[in-house]
Structure formats: C-alpha cells, structure tokens
Image: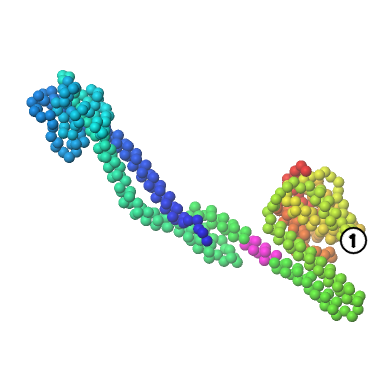
Amino acid sequence: MRGHGSLKQRLLLLSLTTVLLVWIGATAFTYFDAREDLDEVLDVYLEQTAALLVVQASHDIDDIETEHAPQLHKRDRSVAFQIWEKGNQLRLHSANAPAQPLANQDYGFSDSTVEGHSWRVYSTWDDYGKYRIHVAERTDVRDQVARGIAGNLLEPLWLSLPLLAALLWVAVARGLRPLDKLATDVGNSDPNTLTALDTEAAPREVLPLIERLNQLFVRIDATIQQERRFTADAAHELRTPVAAIKAQAQVARAASGDAERMHALDNAIVGCDRATHLIEQLLTLARVDALDGGATAICSLREKASGEIAAIAPSALDKGVHIELADGDEIGVPGNPELLRILMRNLIDNAVRHTAAGTTVQVNIGREQGAVCLSVSDDGPGIPEGEIDKIAERFYRPADTQASGSGLGLSIVKRIAEVHDASLQFGQNENGRGLCVKVKFAQAAQV
C-alpha cells in the first residue's frame, strides 16, 4: 500500500527548513548591516589617511625624490593614493595606483572605475590649493571582507545542521509517542467490545482525536449490536414461514386425495408469499439503513399517495377494505422520491392488513402546527397504550394480532422519517378506535 510520507520526516523537514530560512535571513540582515558599518569605518579611514597626506604634502613633499611610496603590507595593494600638483601633475602615488586620476571631483567621496578596477575614492586639496590628494580602496576587497563576515556566520550552521537534525529527530520521536501509543491502543482494541480509549494521560492536541474515536466506537458498537439483533430476528422470522412451507409440502406428499393435496399446496403457496414479503421487507430495510437521503427532489405527497393507493387497491378490495384519500391542497416536501414512495406504501399496506372487512383506511395530507402532516388511520383493533412505543421496533407484532405481516413495515417508515428529519407519531383514530400514524415534515416546498 502506498503511504503518504512519514509525519516525523515532515516535522523534521519543516523544522530544519524553518531554522535554515531564519538563519539565512539573519545572516543576510547581518551582512547588509555589517557592510554598511564597514563602509562607514573604511570611509573614515580613507578620510583620515587623506588628512595625514595633506599635512605631509604641505611641509616636505618637495624633499621627496621618488614618486613611488613603498608597499609595507600585503593588503596595501587594495589601498592607493595619489598626490597631484595643481591637479594635473602626479607628484607622488602608491605603487599600485594607476597613472590617471582616481577621481574627477575635487572634494568628498566618489566611486570610479580605473583600469578595470572599481574604487571607493576620497578626494581633497591641501590648505594652499597646491596639491590635490586622492585616497582610494578597491571595492572588490570590501566585498570580500563582507562575504567573509557572512561566511563566518553561516559556517556554524553547516557544521551544526546534522547535529540539529539528529536532536530534532529525537525530539520529534519523543513528542509523537502519544500517537504511537494511540495507534497501539486502537490496534489492540477488541472489535467485539470496542472499549473506550484512555484519555487521562493524553496530550491536549491528541485528546480531541481520542474523544472522536471513542464516540465512533460507541456508534460502531451500537450498529454491531443492532445488526446482531437484526440477523437473529431475521433468522427467527424466516424460520417460521420456511417451516410452514415444509410442513405443507409434507402434507401434500402424504395426502391420499386431490382435495387434501390441493389444500396443502395452496397453504404452501401462501407460505411462499409470506416468506417473499418478509424477504422484500428485509431487503428494503437494509437498503434504507444504508442510505442517508440520497438524491433529493420536490415530491408531491398527494401524488405519491394516489399512486400507492392505486397499487394496493386490488388486494384491499379483495379483503373488503376501502381506501380513501381526503381532499386537500397539493403539498410538496424535499426528499428522496423512492424512499417517500416506500414510506407511503408501508403505511397504507400496514393499515389495510390490520383493519377488518367493511372498514375504511383514511389517508390525509395537510398542515398541522406549521408542519406538513401525512396521516394514515384505520378502524382496526388498535394498539394497547402500553405497547405504542414498541410498534416501530423491528419484528414487533402485538401478541393478539391476527393479521399477516413481518413486523418491519413501521420500522421502515421510522427509518425513512429519520432520513428526512421528520417526526413519527402514533395514536388512536379520531373516533377512538384503530391506529393513526402521523409523519410530520418540517420543510415544505411549492409543487
């Protein structure tokens, strides 16, 4: 599996890069600041040297027989001077001074290029206006000195950078120990229990991650327990129709007459229909559990109700139950069209299954306390008050119910309502009989 790089390496690289950039920035600042101070010091040096030459030239320059001053120091080649009589006759100069004037101005500092060399020049005249004096220093030498200062500042960095990298690696490794411990704790967690991770010794930076993991463990554990119950209940519920089908098949095989055999086969077909309905409900519930709304659109509840009433009407008529959709305005809600269709079908189908022949299932769509309200009510036996809170649980069926079913219809309705941020309420019909299921949607939209 391709990784995304080491966190330790990234922290080390960022730390070293930061140190390097700061050090280079400090060196650059020091270089330019030192260069400015160096120029000022060397300019003062040139000015003082020129003042000494002025004094010397005013007293005994006529006694000097040679025009060349000796070179006394190895660095003297970087400093030169000239003494010009009347500004046009070179009387005295250093050994490295050119034959032409170092500068064209009479007083002050200037920069010039003579014979391919750049010079920093200080010019002045003696008190009698007889001699013009130039004292100069090559600028490349100044640059060399400034670069030497910068090099001296950077040299400790190059020498200490490997040591700094090693120390930072150790520091980063020690600092990331809580993450290593967290990874070990998560790896050692028992998937069957998912106990909460310890937060006592966790650093503040890692604590939010551990808290989120603990919250995730709680949700995962709840999901696992729910799936275990669901699997156990599904196996139990499927066992009943399969056993009934097997029993009817055995009766049909052992039957001595055609009438008895046909009756057993008819019962086996009924058992197959019941098992098919249960499997369809299980698949629907699994699909709804995996969704989180999905694609949304503006759905007309009245249109959905009309379509499902038309689909269920034939089986309802066979049972002698009438389905009625109350008059009202077109009201739309934002949601998943397929899920809302399933919700509507399960509500109406559940009401038809649990009401007696000759009664009516009432479907009403309107507004109630500012919310869009869908209600489906029947004239069946209703639900005992103590069991109202249980009827939306998976596979729950009242003990005295005679209607066929899987006990999943209202569980599916509850899950779809949760996906659409809708509330689910159970109560009695307006006439005090049967069951009335209300789904209230907080949002409405123009159809």
Seen from the viewer's position, the closer of residues 109 and 338 is 109
- Up the image or down, 189 lies above or below 88; here it is below
- Up the image or down, 346 lies above or below 153; here it is below
What's the residue at 54%, 60% (across, down)? 197
What's the residue at 30%, 42% (across, down)? 150
Tag 1 residue: 318
Q: Is residue 75 visible?
A: yes
What's the residue at 73%, 54% (across, down)? 416
The spot of residue 376 in percent (x, y) is 82, 53
* Residue 442 relative to residue 315: left or right: left
Q: Secondary structure at mark 1?
A: helix
Amino acid under disc 1 = Asp
Which span is picked out in magenta?
A: 221-230
The spot of residue 428 in percent (x, y) is 82, 55
Q: Is residue 428 visible?
A: no
Residue 124 found in image quarter: top left
Q: Quadrant of the C terminus?
A: top right
What's the residue at 28%, 38% (across, down)? 143
Residue 271 found in image quarter: bottom right
* Residue 270 relative to residue 297: left or right: right
Residue 356 found in image quarter: bottom right
- Up the image or down, 60 lies above or below 38; here it is above
Q: Is residue 225 magenta?
A: yes
The spot of residue 26 in percent (x, y) is 35, 42
Figure label count: 1
Give neighbour class at mark 1: few <14, some 14-19, many 20+ (Cα, 10 Å). few
Colour convention: rainbow
* Residue 323 relative to residue 213: left or right: right
Tell me which secondary structure the magenta stretch mostly adopts.
helix
